[in-house]
Image (cartoon, helix red, strand yellow):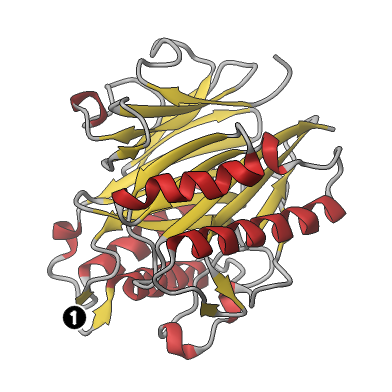
Amino acid sequence: MSGLQLLGGPGEPLVSRETALILGGARIGLCPDAAHTALGAWPEQILPARLLGTTAASWQEVWQCPHPCRAGQHDGLLWRRSGDILYGVISLDEAEFAHSELPPLQAATESAYRRIFALLAAEQLPELWRVWNYFAAINAETHGLERYRQFNSGRQAAFIACQAALSGKVPAACALGVAHGPLSIAFMAGKTAATPVENPRQVSAYFYPAAYGPKSPTFSRAVLAHPPGQEILFISGTASILGHQTVHAGDVAAQTEESLNNILAVLAEANRQAHSAPFQAQELCYRAYVRHAADQPRVARVLASVLGAADICYVEADVCRSDLLVEIEATGIHRT
């Protein structure tokens, strides 16, 4: 193995927990073994959400690297580093921020991102490539504001405090709602800056108008990251949005088609800037987040018509806007 590999699949663990060659990963599911991270294991993001379209109780993803990792903990963060690539996970209970002047989720989000930036500064790996964000009740309104908008305010406050860019060179990301659990953030970072990729069919998220909240989301539609000898395409969570507006409200099949059209548009833009051979839609690994479990077969049929037998993990989760029924993200790795 000459570089990073992303391994994913349902059921039993993909690799031994004793290996030093795992940078980090994620476990999705409602089964008992997805309830905690074993002491001494790699940083693993636990996503307590139901898998759809499979009888498996859990799905595991791991980033495997060619050289042993250095591991550590930093202010509640569990992380591993291989060369100039770092993967970390942090989970914060909103109850710990109940006495903040800010809404607890907003305060927890700002704290988590400040800790992430502090770790990256300490490790001299300043470039945040990809972030996965999950928290409960994303569309609920508390403290006079939708929780997703609270999250965006906390994230942006941390970016400003840590002198990180708010537009242009920002990481790929997703933010999804789960039924319960803490604020959970996983991230990958490196020494070299990733190349941001935007979608010509959409307004960049960081330029959304104020109608979508007091602070805009801070993420790129995709990025191209460049570990030694490789190119990684991270496509952010992508939904049925044209310009900045939701389209096809109430029609999950049409929303899936539009989400896929947006992914294909981002893919074309990424391939214009890529250093490697063109990325093909069928070769990428996907997570498809579906708001209503009963909609999964329709989502799967639309995706199969274009993506064929691509690797897709279907997850029951709430999308960042209450009128969005599906969101899709993707990852691909090439040699350069």
Q: Is residue 77 left or right of residue 245?
A: left
> Dot 1 corresponds to which residue?
143
Point 82% across, 50% down: residue: 271
Badge 1: residue crowd in 10 Å (few <14, some 14–19, many ≥20): few
Point 13% across, 70% down: residue: 99
Residue 53 appears at what percent x and percent y? 37, 36
Instruction: Work out whether 336 lies above or below 253.
Output: above
Element marked by disc 1: loop
Q: Is residue 119 left or right of residue 202?
A: left
Residue 124 seen anywhere in this rendered image of the structure: no
Residue 137 appears at what percent x and percent y? 23, 62
Of 100 and 183, which appears nearest the observer? 183
Instruction: Work out whether 300 lies above or below 256.
Output: above
Point 86% across, 38% down: residue: 277
* Three-letter code, disc 1: His
Of 65 and 306, which appears nearest the observer? 306
Point 49% across, 71% down: residue: 217
- Kindly indicate the quadrant of the structure image that contains residue 221: bottom right
Q: Is residue 302 left or right of residue 194?
A: left
Residue 206 appears at what percent x and percent y? 57, 75
